[in-house]
Image (tube, grey):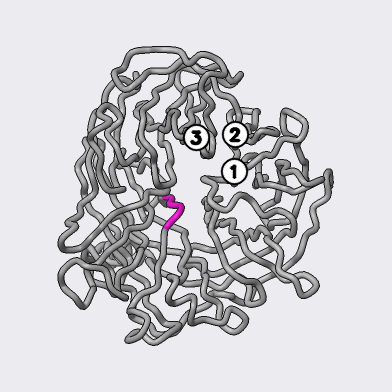
Amino acid sequence: MRHFLILIMSLFLTQIYSQETFSKTIDLDPDARRNYIRDMMMVEDKIITQSIQFCPQDSIFFACGTMTQFDLSGEIITSKYNYETAAYFDGPGCLNFKDNILYYSTNLHQDSFKKTTLIGYNLLLEEQLSQSFEGPESKSNIDNQGIAIIGNNMYIYGNVNNDSGVPRFNTSHKNQSGRKSTMEKNTIHLQVLNLILITYKRHQTETLHSILQLNSPNGASTGFNGTQLIKIDTSGNVLDSFTFQGTNRQPNRLLVTSDNRYVFSSTRNPFDYYDSAPPGRIHNMNALMDSLEWSFILPNDQLVDGKHYNLFDFIEAQNGDIVACGMAYDNTDTELATGSADKNSTWNGFIVRISPDGEIKWLKLYKNPNNLLSKDDYGRFRPSRLNKIKELPDGRLIAAGDIFVNNTQFAAINEEETEAFHLWLLMVDAEGCIENYDCEEIIRLDQSEDLQYAIGSEWIYEKYIISDLTQT
């Protein structure tokens, strides 16, 4: 009996510690060019990504949206693309799931103007419905940014530009000193560059949250440039907001935690305009939007590694930790050994894990090898980024991003012969580690010199032409 229990325990531990981790570089379609990841989500035990590519049609390449379903080993099950559904390239999220329908919101050009299109798929990625929506004003363009679902309601969000190209903005807000004031209508013209909605429920009250980058009109030498956090109800009424000044040179994402704190990034301290830093600062603001619980700059030494960061996604882990991903510029591997950039300096995907109290538990950079060109002439690495991250029930983290080329590498590549832009899937354990690699701050993914394309025996490729309204 004792030996039997030992055997059972051994099998149990083997099951725990045999959880797969990997890094895979994937060419979704050998005939298409480029790849830009837009969104990723977990549905049951499947990984679903949505990418933008340039797909061939009658000897011409058109932007198209590609939906791909992977298993937890990173193998492709199904991949399909839709012509005329090339969503905004750097949008924060366009996928959502409810009642066995996978919803995808995107842009569709019709009559020289952008419209929002909502497409529904079943879990086999077979189209179930398609509906297009016009902007609130005639001759208005919509840059679709994503979709949120609360209860039985669906919210599609993004940017709307009218004839002048500059929407007018009016709201009550808290300024950097925490005092409330009101912008007089039409006296300040703010261009909405990015709108991200995160939803949560508390005491049966449904609310949505957004983060906006605010810029003065093009060509204006004066005006307000900054960031605004907004809390609204499901009717669009502003419940609270916070605005701070300072141009943000990176994409942004707002995470509302389970205890209603706000996690976001910027290059300036929201309460001190003169406190600026290289990109890579993370803030945790309290639920009242009137103080920071913690704020720090990700580790960097400009004289040694030259690190600076762009943060693309935040999630709250099951234990309350904050996990973020993005891209980090790094000079660690330069031949000059002075922190100065050379051919081996590059952008790399990174993941950082932070405790609820604001302590960095670990930070990992993942460097992808240059296996397209001579390393001596074009550097050891290809640039990469991680755009989306999710946590699995067993604690592993799955991130999706892109591997591409820098300007020097791109000049040496013929895109008709060599695909230089790839989808990147990265599965790591709860400590950010990958099996068969030393778990250090910088993990150099140079074990294989050859690209591995995870096509699989079940790969399916289909083309869809989207009509204005189709329902099956």
Residue 406, by quadrant, is bottom left
Instruction: Report the magenta residues as a range.
Output: 386-390
Q: Residue at x 44, y 77 (%)?
A: 409
- For the residue marked with disc 2, what is the amino acid? Ile
Q: Nearer the viewer, residue 12 or 249?
A: 249
Q: Residue at x 20, y 63 (%)?
A: 305
Return the disc, 1 or 3, that comes first in the chain's sequence. 1
Judge the density around disc 3: few (<14), some (14-19), many (≥20) Cα neighbours within 10 Å. few
Q: Secondary structure at mark 3?
A: loop
Residue highlighted by disc 3: 220
Q: Are marks 2 and 1 in contact (CB under 8 Å)?
A: yes
- For the residue marked with disc 3, what is the amino acid? Ala
Residue highlighted by disc 1: 96
Q: Is residue 471 visible?
A: no
Q: Is residue 404 visible?
A: yes
Q: Secondary structure at mark 2?
A: strand
- For the residue marked with disc 1, what is the amino acid? Asn
Q: Nearer the viewer, residue 93 or 60?
A: 60
Spatial separation of the CA atoms under disc 3 and disc 2 = 37 Å
Which x, y percent locates residue 470? 84, 46
Q: Secondary structure at mark 1?
A: strand
Q: Nearer the viewer, residue 182 or 362?
A: 182
Q: Is residue 307 above or below residue 460?
A: above
Q: Nearer the viewer, residue 22 or 131?
A: 131
Which x, y percent locates residue 440? 21, 65
Judge the density around disc 2: few (<14), some (14-19), many (≥20) Cα neighbours within 10 Å. some
Residue highlighted by disc 2: 149
Q: Nearer the viewer, mark 1 or mark 3?
A: 3
Spatial separation of the CA atoms under disc 2 and disc 1 = 7 Å
Residue 387 magenta: yes
